[in-house]
Amino acid sequence: MKIFDKIKKQINDNPIILYMKGTPENPRCGFSDKAVKIILFYKVKFTYIDILKNSDIRIYLPKYADWPTFPQLWVNNQLIGGSDILYTLHTSNKLKKILNF
């Protein structure tokens, strides 16, 4: 499977997916930690991909998404953004609607 097909399948198969450094239990950077805490606040089920253990994803997702940084939150096949955007959406109560509440 080509890497772009693999990424597309992950995004299509998971309504909420977070590409992050580390795991939700052990984030490996402050931005990933911030994103996880925000998502966990809403108590929604989400999938994560540890880009530190998936170098192909780490290299090619920024090209696929046209977004250079991590973490990346995708909801219903749409890129929402990274931790700063999640924080802004969370504090303005817009993330709740995006996550289908």
Image (tube, grey):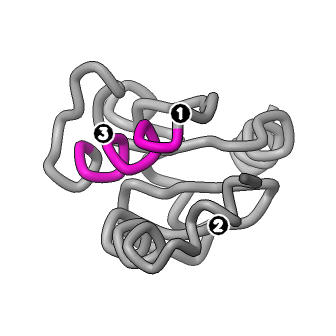
Check whether the beta carbons of the residues at disc 2 and disc 3 lie within 8 A of each other.
no
96 or 2: nearer the viewer: 96
Identify residue type, mark 1.
Lys
**Residue topped by disc 2:** 79
Q: What crowding class fits label 1: few (fewer than 14 Cα within 10 Å), some (14-19), or many (20 or more)?
A: few
Identify residue type, mark 2.
Leu
**Residue topped by disc 1:** 43
In percent of width and height, residue 97 lies at 69, 65
Could you tell me how far apart the alpha carbons at marks 1 and 2 are, in whole angstroms?
20 Å
Magenta residues, dominant SS class: helix
Could you tell me how far apart the alpha carbons at marks 1 and 3 are, in whole angstroms?
20 Å
Which segment did they paint magenta? 33-42
Q: Does 100 sit left or right of 52 as displayed?
A: right
Among numbered discs 1 and 2, the one appearing first in the sequence: 1
Judged from the image, the secondary structure of the residue bearing numbered disc 1 is loop
Judged from the image, the secondary structure of the residue bearing numbered disc 2 is strand
**Residue topped by disc 3:** 21
What residue lies at 62% left-to-right and 42% top-to-bottom? Answer: 17
Q: Does the magenta stretch include residue 38?
A: yes
Among numbered discs 1 and 3, the one appearing first in the sequence: 3
